[in-house]
Every structure is written in C-alpha cells, then in structure tokens.
Image: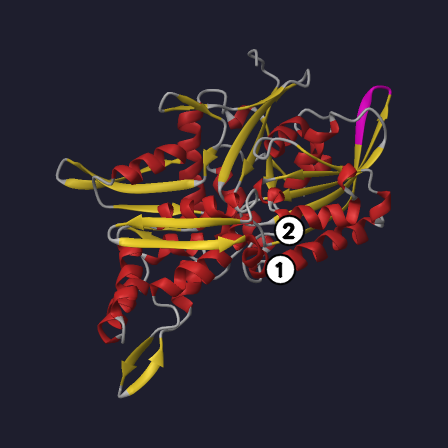
Amino acid sequence: MPPSENISIGVDFGTSNTVVALADSQGHVEALTFEHGGAELKVYVTALCFWDERHGNGLRTQVEGGPWAIEQFLEGLTAHRFIQSFKTFAASATFQETRIFRERYRFEDLLSAFLRTLVRHGGSRLDWGARSVVIGRPVQFAGFNPDDALAMERYRAAFGKLGAEHARYVYEPVGAAFFYARQLDHDATVLVADFGGGTSDFSVMRFSRAGGTLRAEPLGHAGIGIAGDAFDYRIVDRVVSPRLGKGGLYRSMGKTLAIPNHYYANFARWNQLAMMKGSGDLKELRELAKVALDPEPLEQFIDIIEYDLGFALYRAVSSAKVALSGSEETELRFEGEGVDIRARIARSDFESWIAEDVARIAGTVDEALSRAGVKAAEIERVFLTGGTSFVPAIRRLFVDRFGEGRLTSADQFESIACGLALIGQTEDPGRWAI
C-alpha cells in the first residue's frame, strides 16, 4: 500500500490469533505483515512470554508476543511464563490479576503488553494516535456469565495506553460483512457467521448500492461463547485428561476419594492452563500425587504444567481436530518430558462430544435471524469465516438451514481486520460503533 496520510487501521484481536489491516481512501486494504524467521506473517499469534534478564545487580522482566513469544518459550533458556488465549478473561469479573515473577498483571495489563509487542514489530504504520482505528469485539464475550461492560472497560484502558483512546469498537462479524460486501453487485441480505477461538458471532446485514456507493444496514446480531477452543476442550476432556488421572482415586483420613474434577476443567481450557503454574493448583496436585492410589498419571499431569507443555498439547489437539475435518479418523499424538499420549479418535465420536455445543450454536443462529426479523429463506448469502467453519458438523448446520449454494467463505484470518479497516474509511465510521 503506498504511503498516505489517510490510512485507517482495523484490529482483529482474537483468542488464538490477531490480525491488523490497513485501508486507504481508495478502498485498497491489506493485512499488516510481520517478518519473522525469514517469513512474512499476516497472523500474529495471541500469546505472551515473560522471562527475567539480569540488569546490573537486579532482574528485569522482559516480554515478547506473537511468534517471538513462541520462539522465546521454545528456547526455554531461562525461567518464563507463557500465556495464551488470555482474551477469554476479558469479561470475567473473577479474573482480577495474575502474578508474573514480581509483578501483578490485570487483564488490561496483559493486553497492553501484548499490543506493545505488536506495535514494536509492526513498524511505523501503526501510529494509532494519528489514525482512524476500528477495533473488533465479539457480539458476546466468552466465559461464564460474561460482563460486557467490564470487558469493554478493559479494552479501552489497554488500547488507550497506546494512544488509541479515540478508537471505535465494532462487532467482529460486521467487519467480516464489510469485507465480503465488496463482492456484491446487487442488493442482498447476508448472514455473516464468524467462528473464532473463543466465540461464535452472527450478524444479519442488508447491503444495497445507490449511486455507486455501498450502503449497509445491520438488522440483528447474536453471539455465544462457544467456538474452536470449546471443541478442543471436548478432545482434552475425553481423550487426554483420563490418561492424566481424571477419574482416579486418593486416600485421605482413612477414606478413598475421587480426585477433584476442577483441576481437569482448568487443564482443558487453554486460558486456564496458562495460569495453572502460577496458581495454587500445582502445589495441590503434588500433594494429591503423594496419596493417589495410582500416582503416575497425576505425576505426568504435573509434568505438563511444570515443564510448560501446554502449548505443545494445544498444537497436538488442534491438529487432531483439523484432521477430523478431512478424515473419518485420526490419531492424537503428544509427547514430551516423558509424557507420551497416543489415541485414535473417530469423527463420529468427536461429533457426539460436540453435539450439545453445535446445538447451542444453532440456537444462536436462529436468535440472530429472529432479532433481524428475517427468515432463513430470505437470506441470499451466508458468509462463513474462521477455522471452525470447516468442522463438518458446523458446515452441515448451515447446509441444512440455507442450502449449499448459498454458502460462501473467504480467508479465515484476514477478513475481519480488513473489513474493520474499510469501515474506518466510510463517511461515518461511528455509525457502526458499539
């Protein structure tokens, strides 16, 4: 994109990945690239790695984000904390802070630290104070009983620290809709389905053209805190956790008791797993292992937390999930630090595990249509974005309701950020703000 003063910035801060896009007044839009390891990346992994370095007589905490965080984590030359999927804490009133080495970090501190690494690697074009900035947000935040107002307060505090206190916040599927609408050459009512890592969001939009100008009217929105990470949770809960002591027993005060399930509930959620090492869970698990009837599975559970194997587990589980989109069966393989887990997973089993999640997603689609006052037959096109849209059970949901011919999709990572940047170039970007 040629240099221009009239550049708008779109930010899709995601649970698993973050994308930033730039648009100019001529309608040109492109995702910002990050040069890492000889490659140009358009996706900045939503992860943080903290570690200590000695400065003079003391220690100073360093932080990296994106692929650099993963690189630092995998090198593992010093003590560190690796955090992923922390967007899931945005709307949680119970998450007040986490301790990292000598400091306490609130959610907004984690987000602002992450954004600073993104700006550092993104270059001079990320001058947020001098640009029109449009930031995506889910229709409904992830988590139990999410507090929307709290999440937005935290977003504004974090982005404000980087000079983007003037930023506008727009529903993520609306950004995807704007990106898709460039293909339209006629009036149309469109359903946009955006599947992220933590949330699934749906918007019904009416697009029309008058005098060559594209106009868009949002008719209805709905969202739910179920998406790709929830499907990962089902695999971990059904396949991995039973091999790490879930369902096991321990002795206490002359009684035989079941190992509490809440450790495994935390373990199967990527955001919670990232925090287990810094909480009291690790200490409690070590005490349980001493009195467990079969301590070896618990000891392997402890090793995964202690040796920071969560990211490797995340990749193994996600790979198995992706493989099931194209095959009737796959093998989950995970190994490290003496932990070796191998299991065959059939797509039919996986679909039975996620059936309740898919049903709730279907209900949210119906809710979006109801709020829009539109019937399924009145939807001309359904625009799917996000990796979870490739899961066969999800695909069937939309085929059954709308028919294969009305479904379309685009780049699963860039469409939202590009659409948000394009909104920043409209006559009244504030019209779309929440």
- Whether residue 267 appears in this view of the structure is yes
The mark total stands at 2
Residue type beneath disc 2: Ala
**Residue 148 drawn at (x, y percent):** 60, 53
The stretch of residues the image draws in magenta is 211-215
**Closest to the observer: 212 or 358?**
358
Assign a secondary structure to mark 2.
Answer: helix
Assign a secondary structure to mark 1.
Answer: helix
Q: How was this image coloured? A: secondary structure
Q: Specify few, some or many for label 1: CA neighbours under 10 Å numbering under 14, 14-19, or 20 or more.
A: some
Residue type beneath disc 1: Ala
Q: Quadrant of residue 156?
A: top right
368 left or right of 148 in image: right
Q: Is residue 213 magenta?
A: yes
Q: Would you say the residues marked 1 and 2 are in contact, meaning their CB atoms lie under 8 Å apart?
A: yes
- Nearer the N terminus, badge 1 or badge 2? 1
192 left or right of 104 in image: right
- Whether residue 171 appears in this view of the structure is no
CA separation in Å, label 1 and label 2? 8 Å
**Closest to the observer: 340 or 398?**
340
Q: Which residue is mark 1?
A: 355
* Dominant SS in magenta: strand
Q: Which residue is mark 2?
A: 393
**Residue 275 drawn at (x, y percent):** 37, 55
Q: Specify few, some or many for label 2: CA neighbours under 10 Å numbering under 14, 14-19, or 20 or more.
A: many
The residue positioned 22% from the left and 72% from the top of the image is: 290
